[in-house]
Image: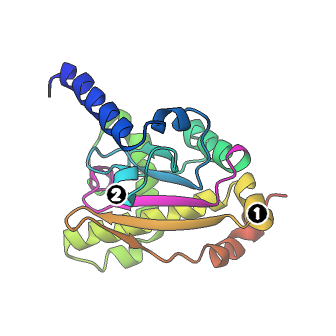
Amino acid sequence: MKIQEIFKNNQNWIDRKLNENARFFENLSKDQNPDILYIGCSDSRVSAEELMGLSPGDVFVHRNIANMVSNIDLSVMSVIDYAVIYLKVKHIVVCGHYDCGGVKAAMKSEDMGILNPWLRNIRDVYRLHKKELNLIHDQNLKHKRLVELNVQEQCLNVLKTAEVQKAVREDGLRIHGWVFDIESGKLLDLNINFKKDLENIMEIYHLD
């Protein structure tokens, strides 16, 4: 794609939005009040608003390789803090996707250079669930299961943060783990019982 085409596309998008609603950008510029924080993968095939059928202003989005929630990543921690404390979101979604390059890379015994520290977080998920994963001999199915388990662990990492724990107790904040199936276009709800998970980790991770 030629970069200049993007500006033409932008003008076409502006014209289309104004034809639908003459005050679209006026209303959009006033403020944001999203109900959802979406933490997803940077994969170019996975567009948060589009796959959920939402519009600009409906969802606060953070994306990184393999939808990780690392407590030493100031970017994702700042996003969670801002979304929970200032935007008062009602839902936090961690969404992974099948055919994730980050997860596939973490499954290889290969030196990935600067990516090594990041991929180690995914390899830690594999280590935690090694017994289950090693029983899966089909590599495609193993990859899919690791994608799901990674989402599950990142939801737990969200729950380990103080501002989230407080919002769950006081404001009814809910945590969701989803997977996007690229081949079918479907969003799959992993039905993570975040309240039970929170109870299970509170002995160690409870923060007043």
Which residue is label 1 attached to? 171
Identify the mark nearer the N-term, 1 or 2: 2
Q: Is residue 114 left or right of residue 172?
A: left
Please state which of residues 67 and 13 is positioned toward the viewer in this rendering: 13
Vertical relation: 150 (above or below) 30: below
Q: Is residue 152 left or right of residue 53?
A: right
Per the image, is 95 magenta?
yes
Q: Residue at x 36, y 44 (%)?
A: 20
Secondary element at image label 2 = helix
Please state which of residues 140 and 110 is positioned toward the viewer in this rendering: 140
Q: Is residue 100 left or right of residue 132?
A: left
Q: CA distance from mark 1 to mark 2?
A: 27 Å
The picture quadrant where one finds residue 158 is bottom right
Q: Residue at x 39, y 59 (%)?
A: 52
Mark 1 closeness class: few <14, some 14–19, many ≥20 residues within 10 Å: some
Q: Quadrant of the N terminus?
A: top left
Q: Is residue 171 left or right of residue 131?
A: right
Q: Amino acid at mark 1?
A: Asp
Which residue is label 2 attached to? 51
Secondary element at image label 1 = helix
The residue segment tinted magenta is: 86-106
Q: Amino acid at mark 2?
A: Leu
Please state which of residues 117 and 185 is positioned toward the viewer in this rendering: 185
Q: Position of residue 73 (x, y in %)?
A: 56, 40
